[in-house]
Amino acid sequence: MGKDNLTAVLYKINDLRLEQTEIPQPKDDEVLLEMSCVGICGSDVHYLVNGRIGDFVVTTPMIIGHEAAGVVSKLGKNVQNLKVGDRVAIEPGVPCRTCSFCKHGRYNLCREVIFCATPPVHGNLRRFYTHAADYCFKLPDHVSLEEGALLEPLSVGVHACKRAGVTLGSQVLILGAGPIGLVTLLVAKSLGATRIVITDLVQSRLDVAKELGADKTLLVDRNDDEPTLVKKVHALFGDEPDITIDASGAEASTRLAVLATRSGGTAVLVGMGPPEIKLPLVQALAREIDIRGVFRYVNCYPAALELVASGKVDVKRLITHNYDIKETHEAFETARTGRGGAIKVMIHCDRS
Ligand code: NAD
Ligand code: 572
Ligand code: ZN
């Protein structure tokens, strides 16, 4: 028996097992990482509970996890940018590098991308894992590995704010105060948005948003009709938002994004709901609302790291629960139920 490589493998719906796997050898351009921590993302929970997201179906056992950081323990023979002992954040999607999307700098749209824990690609919730060295970002000493793992969702917030054009003076409406809405809030603030209003159905999430710097919050009442919701949003702004970012994926929010945004403004869709929804598109047309999509992130890790390293953004408050890898089932139960006000559940791979 070699070294311990305890690994969280999703076999099928509600069948997540902890078992030993081989420690992989790094290829020439890869590093072997001793994994430190892995955050649980909503998509990990979704695969556990539903076995699929859209066309991505768990048909063969898949190692879960993609929000991760670790310590370099071995170098492939071509690796120059890292050394053994470096603490790194892992950007989980490695593109083909040669298609037209990659060549034009939009590698998040690469059709051949290998993205951790998107079936059939394995993720990194395990003690040892290999990854492309140039998709690992060395952390300065004062940035923790937990913060390194959180660069993953933070990068989604960075990309969403870039796609939205958030800048000094922006008035931003964020729909949904889950981890993605909250990181978007943090990034929008750091970019100088002057007024940020955030909505959710759950008051405890709005309380966290307030702590993180939201100017106003709106507890959405599902019984409110759309004109009422739009009026409430505009009243909270004392104006109309230039930018709305939907981080909920609820159809009602996506509609509200179009309805509440100022004419000439931008509605950015991050939340992933049903594949088809009904939208007031004539409103978007007649009021020149730009609707922009977000697919993960591209070239955002450096900016996300800079935000954390400079202290402009504090992501640590998002972590509400910590578990050891041996407690993976309990960790997923906490993430699934949201018990104890769970926002980001972190699993530590190096603690026992
Ligand atoms: P989450 O489920 O934790 O958060 C969503 C929040 O939206 C919850 O707090 C929920 O209460 C709230 N919500 C639901 N309906 C609402 C409504 N009508 N109005 C206001 N709030 C409402 O999920 P998360 O991890 O924060 O992710 C958010 C969404 O972003 C998910 O749909 C996820 O799949 C998606 N996502 C997309 C990308 C991408 O690349 N586009 C990347 C990461 C996550
Ligand atoms: O951290 C990346 C990430 N991306 C999410 C969700 C959660 N975390 N997305 C929503 C689902 N899509 S997808 O295209 N897919 C399953 C590949 O439907 C990816 C982006
Ligand atoms: Zn994710």
Image: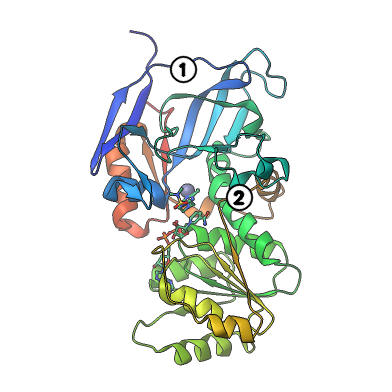
Q: What residue is rendered at 41% in x and 70% in y?
A: 250
- Closer to the camera, 81 or 203? 81
Q: Is residue 186 above or below residue 41?
A: below
Q: Can you give x and y, in whole percent of width and height, for residue 170 in the image?
A: 71, 74
Q: Secondary structure at mark 1?
A: loop
Left or right? Give the position of 242 relative to 211: right
Q: Is residue 16 left or right of residue 210?
A: left
The Cα atoms of the two marked residues, 2 and 1, are separated by 27 Å
Q: Residue furthest front?
A: 100
Ligand 1's quadrant: bottom left
- The kind of residue tagged 2 is Tyr
Q: Does mark 2 have its CB less than 8 Å from ligand 1?
A: yes
- Does 344 sit left or right of 107 as displayed? left
Instruction: Identify the residue position indicated by label 2 in the image.
Output: 297
Q: Could you say whether the residue bearing mark 2 is in a helix, strand or loop? A: loop
Q: Is residue 90 above or below residue 54?
A: above
Residue drawn at (68%, 35%), measured in percent from left and top?
Answer: 140
Q: Residues within 10 Å of mark 1 (few under 14, many from 20)?
A: few
Q: Residue furthest left?
A: 14
In terms of sequence position, does the residue under pointer 2 or pointer 1 come before the other? 1
The percent position of residue 150, horizontal first and vertical second, equals: 54, 46
Relative depth, front residue between 275 and 210 = 275
Any part of residue 92 in sight: no
Residue under the point 70% across and 43% down: 302
Give the labeled residue for mark 1.
24
> Which quadrant of the view contains residue 118?
top left
How far across and down, in percent of the image, does residue 74 sit? 57, 15
Applied colour scheme: rainbow
